Amino acid sequence: MPYEFDRDLTGLLPPCYREIGEYQALCRAEEESLAQGAEDAQQIARNFHPRTMDTATAAQWEAILDILPNPRTEGLEFRRDRVVNRLSTRPPFTMAFLGQKLDELIGPGRWTAEVDSAANTLYVESLAQDQNYALEVSATIGRIKPAHVVYVSRPVVPARLTAGEQVERTERTYYTKLGLWRLGQVPFAGDAPPEVIKTEQTPSIQNLLLEKTAAGLAGLVAAAKVNGETVIRELEKSVAGNLVTVTYTVARHQAQAIQSLALLDEEGRELTHAAVYIPVTDGVVIKHTIPVEEGGV
């Protein structure tokens, strides 16, 4: 709970001194010092908990935990979260414990983890995250996993293709009859303004159309482009109903950090484009998911 400090010094003076201007000015000056002292005392109490500590205390914890911070790109909130994560990363390590840490760093329901026991590989799939948290996830898993298990990050780059159908009707009026039309003087017919009889918000598109569109979209994708320059053509494409999935691997010699991803057609034109930040260690498996759904514009 916050401490309460009485900072009214004027009220502590004898009544005969309270109306003297010099004493009032002296009390105001001292009250500013007391206010700063009260704030310092409050901060000392807050520094006992990593979630409320200040920058200087965070730096002390980072020195204890052998963390090299980058204050230019890392905010105080992230540095607090990282200290809490390192302090709470203690054995025994289990998949349940890993799940707890991923919930804290990535968010509940925003990741999946899979262990391939035969290949001694741990796959963690999640949305492309902010730079700092992506690096912290990698560091945390490095401390948790056994030495013989390989960690493979599978960042997911989501996109969405929506389709909608609108039906309109138009009344057509004929201004003349056969044999009585004055050519060039009276229009043969005219259309009234269209009237919407079915909006895009009313469902009408069948699954067959969505699935056919998804299959056509998968056929259009011919390559991926990393950071606007590296083109990768070794893709794995699959279509499940109305969901298109495109997967490929980015090696460290191709990019040390991924800042943009795009899917291309055969002529090199961009079909999708996403700004991301994904650090690349030994290699990272990128997964694009594109559901084709009905939705009004």
Image: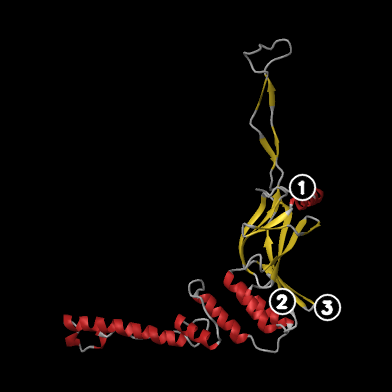
Alpha carbon distance from label 2 to label 3: 14 Å
Q: Where residue 156 sits: x, y (%)?
A: 69, 65
Q: Where residue 245 sits: x, y (%)?
A: 75, 59
Q: Is residue 72 left or right of residue 166?
A: left
Given residues 96 and 157, the one toward you in this image is 157
The reply to whether residue 209 is visible in this rendering is yes
Marks 1 and 3 in Cβ contact (< 8 Å): no
* Quadrant position of residue 243: bottom right
State the residue at coordinates (71%, 76%): 151
Q: Is residue 7 above or below residue 137?
A: below
Q: Is residue 47 left or right of residue 226?
A: left
What amino acid is at disc 1?
Ile
What amino acid is at disc 3?
Ala
State the residue at coordinates (67%, 79%): 141
Given residues 214 and 65, the one toward you in this image is 65
* Label 2 neighbour load within 10 Å: few <14, some 14-19, many 20+: many
* Label 1 neighbour load within 10 Å: few <14, some 14-19, many 20+: some
Label 1 secondary element: loop
**Label 3: which residue?**
118
**Label 1: which residue?**
205
**Label 2: which residue?**
151
Q: Is residue 2 left or right of residue 204?
A: left
Alpha carbon distance from label 1 to label 3: 44 Å
What amino acid is at disc 2?
Tyr
Q: Earlier in the sequence, mark 2 or mark 1?
A: 2
